[in-house]
Image (cartoon, rainbow, N blue to C red):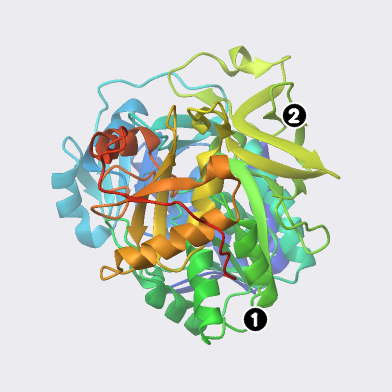
Amino acid sequence: MPDASESFLAGLARHGGRPALRGESGEIAFDRLPEAVAACRGVLESVAARRVALALDNGLQWALWDLALLADGRVCVPLPGFFSPAQQAHVLDSAGVDTLIVDPVAASASAAVFPGFVPVAPGILRRVPAQVPALPTGTVKITYTSGTTGQPKGVCLSAAAQLAVARSVARIGEAGAVERHLGVLPLATLLENIAGLYAGLLAGACVELLPMRTIGFSGGGGFDPARFLQTLHARRPHSLILLPQMLLALVGAAEQGHAPPAGLRFVAVGGGQVSARLLQRAEALGLPVYEGYGLSECASVVCLNTPAARRVGTVGRPLPHAALRIADDGEVQVRGAHMLGYLGEAPLADQLVAGEWLGTGDLGHFEDGFLVLHGRRKHQFITAYGRNVNPEWVEAELVQQGPIAQAWVHGEALAENLAVLVPRRADCSDAELDAAVAAANAGLPDYARAGRWLRADAPFTPANGLLTANGRLRRAALAAHYLPRSGADGAASCATFTSFSDEIDT
């Protein structure tokens, strides 16, 4: 057992008979966890597994297999259920996966879905991969970032990097007396895996893992806010990790008189630009919401607001395991628990600045030690009038408005910025969208405002290729889909705004 994972698993014993994991099929106490993990390790050894993909829904089995792989130092490859079949095949082939763990009930069907794999034990499929690419020394997890274009990219992580992040987050959970964490993001996303599962266990919390349909997510990327809120009230967690859209559902329901679940003590939000106005609305409702920042290349969380150090409009101060600096061009650079390298690409040393700093591609600055993000450097566009605009800022303001569920903003070389909008309701009228855009524009400078808008023909989802796995917009795909019909010459059938003087309180 590798040193980092050995100390991690051994340290959990101090929590004794308290519940460690809870799912639909029951719960496992901390003092029974080693036995459950050992059983999984025995199966892995019996089938000679080396590189193992987890094709499971959230639940006890996902956690146990992941912990077993970590304990043995075998390579774990989480396989997101929201990836397309082609993306999943790419993950399996590019990582050289030889073992696939699936739901035992659906093992036969899984063998048909994943050609070349054959059942060798309940829920265990095996194959001889066509190629086994070399990995950086110490790799125990390959997490795939869906990116903005092309095939997912594999990020190779060590146990030490993952657990350094988990320990930083666990200290916050311990200080906040978090005893129950509900995983509402897929465990195949690094954020829930590290900051939810690992950090929760380190803090001595009971980590509850339910199928994603129970949380309110469908396979195609749809989200049911009512189902989500119903589950929160039924489970009454102390802590959650939310995407901005999920926080918006929680805040919107509370503002309509639906009280948030009792007992919430720490709600982390990340995975995308969060409007300061949304955070202020959450604060006014008494919701303990704390914005953070992280990236897969740094084993998840890098910065996080906490009850002891919080500033709305920032993503918090760096966590103990990380150091940050701002480069001359405004890019945020990180030193600390970062990746070992990208799968199949140049060594990490070739990508570091001054031998130790990893460029994030994000722009930002510090205010009294708190990091303020401006958005992605590569997403910034320059208008026809020479003004630099980060679209994430404008999009965050647009989705604050009740009628707008999703927004994509583009303005490269345009005289007026274009917004493509997904209404929150199918029967939402043009007049309602007009008013919503006007309200958002009222709080923006002239050069950043949406001058025209186009109604999207469908929600942006991972299934249709317009959204990444962790909820970020696929900008190149959106541009290819909508710009040809947008009439950048001014001929599009989009509403054009001439006055944005009325600001409403949202």
Where does residue 317 sit, x and y in percent of width and height?
78, 47
Q: Residue at x 33, y 35 (%)?
A: 479
Residue at left 25%, top 22%? 130
| Left or right side of 291 for 371 | right
Mark nearer the N terminus (1 vs 2): 1
**Would residue 347 be found to the left or right of residue 452 on screen?**
right
Looking at the picture, how far across and down is residue 116, in whole percent?
A: 17, 35
Residue furthest out toward the front: 498
| Residue type (three-letter) at the residue carrying disc 1 | Gly
**Considering the numbered disc 1 on the image, is that residue within a helix, a strand or a loop?**
loop
**Count of numbered marks:** 2
Specify whether residue 135 is in view.
yes
Give the residue displayed 53% in from the left and 28% down from the top: 385
> Relative to 282, is 163 above or below?
above
Amino acid residing under circle 2:
Ile
Q: Residues within 10 Å of mark 2 (few under 14, many from 20)?
A: some
Q: Secondary structure at mark 2?
A: strand
x and y percentages locating residue 338 in the rendered image: 64, 31
What residue would you read off at disc 2? 326
**Which residue occupies the foreground of this view, 368 or 57?**
368
Q: Nearer the viewer, mark 1 or mark 2?
A: 2
- Front residue of this view, candidates 319 and 249: 249
> Mark 1 sits on what residue?
263
User: Which image quadrant: the C terminus?
Assistant: bottom right
- In depth, the one of 480 and 191 nearer the eye is 480
Q: Residue furthest right?
A: 368
